[in-house]
């Protein structure tokens, strides 16, 4: 993370983040372990691990993993969820560190993974830091869920709601890197890139929680909070089918060396 604000802006949203943020498609691990030939016992450093959503998929696939997360509340949530004493995740640990200063030893990990948090990082500084902690031949995996903006009338309406009521939505949304930027960041080290479909089916309570997990959604006490939730309820009523709306994403992933 590049500033105290970017590190702490999710502290009051941890419960909603844990419950309502999307997972990543199983096809991501299939791509990583299949065509990309990453070993399932590779030691992963999950950078900006947050509440452990990104860490869980690696642990479930058999990877030993250290989660690097500077936000104490989010790190505690990950530890509670994925604690080493849980027999299903015996190879998990979490450390207080930043993307640009992980605190990990030189040449100590096989794979650096950075998911949804990557757009907050100083992409020059992290490259040097990740080169330092990767073993020779180690890889970096960058990926995130990109919400589709116009794939359905519901998603068009949701985007307009964020534009109408979000606090700094436009500034945050524009931070996500496009494919050309990521290709340039990896340069000749880029080994592969993929886009995968992903979807959440949400009832009204889950949709509300998904919205409030976003750092740009005004919280209780803000003058736009109540009007935003009223508009969300109207949007849901207009587009729900059998009590659910489809929150659609593309999971975009990039893998390569940082030589």
Image: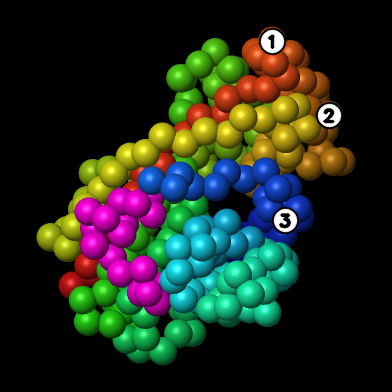
Q: Residues within 10 Å of mark 1 (few under 14, many from 20)?
A: few
- Mark closest to the chain's N terminus, 1 or 2: 2
Residue 39 in the image: above or below residue 144: below
Q: Nearer the viewer, residue 174 or 145?
A: 145
**Secondary structure under badge 1?**
helix
Residue bounds of the magenta highlight: 28-45
Instruction: State the residue at coordinates (51%, 67%).
Output: 59
Nearest the viewer among 80 and 120 is 80
The image quadrant of residue 113 is bottom left
Report whether 25 appears left or right of 162.
left
The image quadrant that residue 227 belongs to is top right
Q: State which tag comes first along the sequence, 3 or 1.
A: 3
Q: Residues within 10 Å of mark 2 (few under 14, many from 20)?
A: some
Scheme by which the image is coloured: rainbow
Q: Which residue is mark 2?
A: 226
User: Which numbered marker is on residue 14?
Assistant: 3
Q: Nearer the viewer, mark 3 or mark 2?
A: 3
Q: Are marks 1 and 2 in contact (CB under 8 Å)?
A: no
CA separation in Å, label 3 and label 2: 20 Å
243 lies above or below 98: above
* Residue 68 percent location from the top left of the image: 53, 73
Residue 167: x and y in percent read 66, 38
Q: Nearer the viewer, mark 1 or mark 2?
A: 1
Give yes or no for contact between labels 3 and 2 (Cβ–Cβ under 8 Å): no
Q: Mark 3 to mark 1: distance in Å?
A: 29 Å
Inspect the magenta stretch and tell me whether residue 43 lies in it: yes
Q: According to the image, label 1 marks what residue?
A: 238
């Amino acid at each position: 993370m590049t500033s105290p604000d970017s590190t702490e802006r999710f502290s009051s949203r941890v419960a909603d983040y844990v419950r309502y943020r999307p997972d990543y498609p199983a096809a991501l691990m299939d791509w990583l372990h299949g065509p990309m030939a990453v070993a399932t016992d590779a030691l992963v450093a999950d950078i900006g691990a947050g509440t452990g959503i990104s860490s869980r998929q690696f642990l479930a696939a058999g990877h030993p993993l250290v989660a690097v997360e500077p936000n104490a509340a989010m790190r505690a949530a990950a530890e509670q969820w994925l604690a080493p004493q849980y027999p299903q995740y015996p190879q998990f640990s979490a450390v207080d560190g930043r993307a640009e200063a992980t605190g990990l030893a030189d040449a100590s990990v096989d794979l650096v993974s950075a998911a949804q948090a990557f757009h907050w990082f100083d992409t020059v500084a992290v490259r040097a830091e990740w080169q330092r902690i990767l073993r020779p031949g180690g890889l970096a995996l960058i990926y995130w869920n990109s919400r589709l903006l116009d794939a359905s009338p519901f998603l068009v309406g949701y985007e307009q709601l964020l534009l109408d009521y979000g606090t700094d939505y436009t500034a945050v949304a524009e931070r996500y890197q496009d494919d050309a930027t990521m290709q340039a960041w990896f340069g000749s080290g880029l080994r592969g890139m993929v886009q995968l479909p992903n979807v959440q089916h949400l009832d009204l309570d889950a949709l509300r929680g998904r919205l409030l997990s976003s750092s740009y959604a005004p919280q209780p006490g803000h003058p736009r909070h109540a009007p935003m939730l009223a508009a969300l309820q109207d949007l849901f009523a207009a587009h729900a089918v059998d009590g659910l709306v489809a929150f659609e994403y593309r999971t975009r992933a990039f893998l390569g060396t940082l030589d």
